Amino acid sequence: MHRLSTEQDGILSTADLRACGLDARAVRRRLDAGTLIRLHRGVYTPTGHRLTEHSRLRAGMLVAAGIADRSSAAFWHGLRRDLPPFLEATVPRNHRVPASNPFTMHPRRRRLDGADIVSIRGLLTTSVALTVLELADVHTLDDALRTRRTTLAELATTAGRYRHCHGLAAGRTLLASANGDTHSEAERRFRALLRAAGISGWHQQHRFERWWIDVAFPGRRIAIEIDGWAYHRSHERFANDAEKHTRLALAGWTLLRFTWQQITEQPAEVVRTLARALN
């Protein structure tokens, strides 16, 4: 039992205890003796085992009879560092999550395609592809692509399985962006921001030594570099950009860098930051 509880973050189900040779009477004796703690009906932990966020998620999924999805799945996949206070799960349509359970649950009743359910260390969760599509977060999707946890082809196939699901609309839009030339599109949107804000005096693709600056204010020596999605950047381009930015600093230029997410989600803040630099 000790080995199993260690492998399962200190969380044991009634079925686990039965597999370890403990019937209902044996479980009751351990509860009375204080060597076993009941967290909820059918969910136990050995006394003294330090419970973690992984323990909380595993126990919550047992209570909900669910499949971890959205932010909970992202945490289990290692795509997010922290587990939110609430647990997100896909639960069977005919299953009612007990209202008196010790976890804050955000259940979703639906049927998932078997191809989008994976088991990781004994916990059922949505696949990386479905998880990042449902989150529709630029950083999470970019990181998953960059580290090859998923591919554009997998994402497109997954999105196709849920083409009538309105909940994936934002994820589909993000996928379309990832499929395109995000650097060029980010530059185009940034220039549109400058025009809308009435900011003048800038040059696009300004020559500097052997490089080109995305957007420059030569008279003020302000260089602006636009970052598309990280997974598009090769090692060679990364090294080349680092050298360019060093040379700019040595020549007395102020370098500002804006990401796709900043330009698309925080345009007003981007304009304010540039205005402060110009003033």
Image: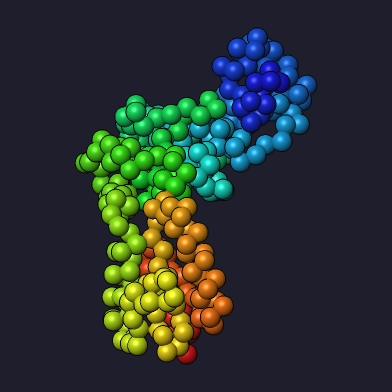
Judged left or right of residue 267, residue 52 is right
Q: Residue at x 50, y 45 (%)?
A: 79
Q: Is residue 60 above or below residue 132?
A: above
Relative to 178, residue 267 above or below: below
**For the view shown, which residue lies furthest in the left direction?**
164
Left or right placement of residue 163 versus residue 155 in this view: left
Colouring of the image: rainbow
Q: Residue at x 55, y 76 (%)?
A: 249
Q: Position of residue 100 (x, y in %)?
A: 53, 37
Q: Height in image: 47 above or below 157?
A: above
Q: Residue at x 66, y 29 (%)?
A: 10
| The N terminus sits in image quarter | top right
Q: Nearer the viewer, residue 141 or 15?
A: 141
**Residue with the most extreme front position:** 210
Residue 33 image-quadrant placement: top right
- Residue 106: image location, x then y, percent: 44, 43
Residue 243: horizontal and vertical position, in percent? 52, 66
Q: Is residue 100 visible?
A: no
* Relative image position of residue 214 (x, y in whole percent): 37, 72
Q: Is residue 188 visible?
A: yes
For image coordinates 48% across by 58% down, the residue present is 238
- From this view, report whether residue 26 is shown above or below residue 120: above
Q: Nearer the viewer, residue 165 or 131?
A: 131
Dividing the picture into quarters, in which one does residue 274 lie?
bottom left
Q: Nearer the viewer, residue 184 or 213?
A: 213
Q: Horizontal placement of 54 versus 218: left or right? A: right
